[in-house]
Amino acid sequence: MWGTLDPHALPAYLHMNTKNAMTTIEGVVQEFVRQEGTIEHLKRGRVEDTITADLANRLRPHFETDGVTVDCQYNKHLNAAKRLNGQVIHLDIAVHERGKDEHNLVAVELETTNNPARDDVWKLEGLTQPLGGYGYELGLFLVFGIGKRAGEILAMEWYSKGARL
């Protein structure tokens, strides 16, 4: 979607191409994980839900407009539950326009652990499929270390068109 449509026909938030979106998100993540409050929280152990909400709040100023929102723990598709491979799923963070598939921009799955299970990568592969998925332009698998590894990014993997970039 980004960079392929007439920019005059798109809302301002869609002028960002995938490379710019990746750079923006990576910068926010790098800054976020270095903050003392984030590090102190990650030292406590598995705090995925809180860290997800905090990171979503940091992403909002970069992506939200009248149409696009940054949601955490999102599980809706139009007026029903979001399903993939027959399973109800939720996204840790969704950058999208609610109620429309045309503006599904970024899906984020996040783990706070020193030993990533990678058990949500399949969602990113499916969600970024142009057909049969939800057509998210990008997926991001993100792992923050905990305890003594608090403040480390253990994984930052991008997905597009159903595969890792």
Image (cartoon, rainbow, N blue to C red):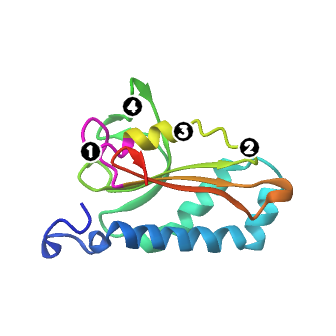
Q: Does the magenta stretch include residue 136?
A: yes
Q: Are circles 2 and 3 on residues that touch, CB within 8 Å? A: no
Quick one: 130 or 59, which is closer to the camera? 130
Which amino acid, by three-letter code, is at mark 3? Answer: Asp
- Which residue is painted at 73% across and 65% down in the image? 38
Q: Earlier in the sequence, mark 2 or mark 1?
A: 2
Mark nearer the viewer, 4 or 1: 1
Magenta segment: 127-137
Instruction: Give the spatial CA distance, label 4 vs label 2.
Output: 25 Å
Q: Residue at point 60% right, 54% down?
A: 52
Q: Name the residue under label 2.
A: 115
- Give the Cα distance between marks 3 and 4: 12 Å
Residue pointed to by mark 1: 130
Distance between the alpha carbons at the discs numbered 4 and 1: 13 Å
Query: Which disc, if any, is residue 120?
Result: 3
Magenta stretch: helix, strand or loop mostly: loop
Number of other residues with Cα within 10 Å of mark 3, as a class: few under 14, some 14 to 19, many 20 or more:
some
Secondary structure at badge 4 equals strand
Q: Report which quarter residue 5 is drawn in.
A: bottom left
Mark before the other along the chain sequence, 2 or 3:
2
N-term mark: 4 or 2: 4
Q: What residue type is labelled 1?
A: Pro
Which three-letter amino acid code belongs to the residue tagged 2?
A: Asn
User: At which x and y percent is residue 97?
Assistant: 31, 56
Label 3 with label 1: CB-CB less than 8 Å: no
Classify 27 as above or below 100.
Answer: below
Q: Marks 3 and 1, how far apart in space? A: 19 Å
- Image quarter hosting the C terminus: bottom left
Instruction: Answer with mark 4 or mark 1, whichever residue precedes in sequence.
Output: 4
Position of 28 with respect to 159 (left or right) is right
Residue under pointer 4: 84
Q: Is mark 1 on a helix, strand or loop?
A: loop
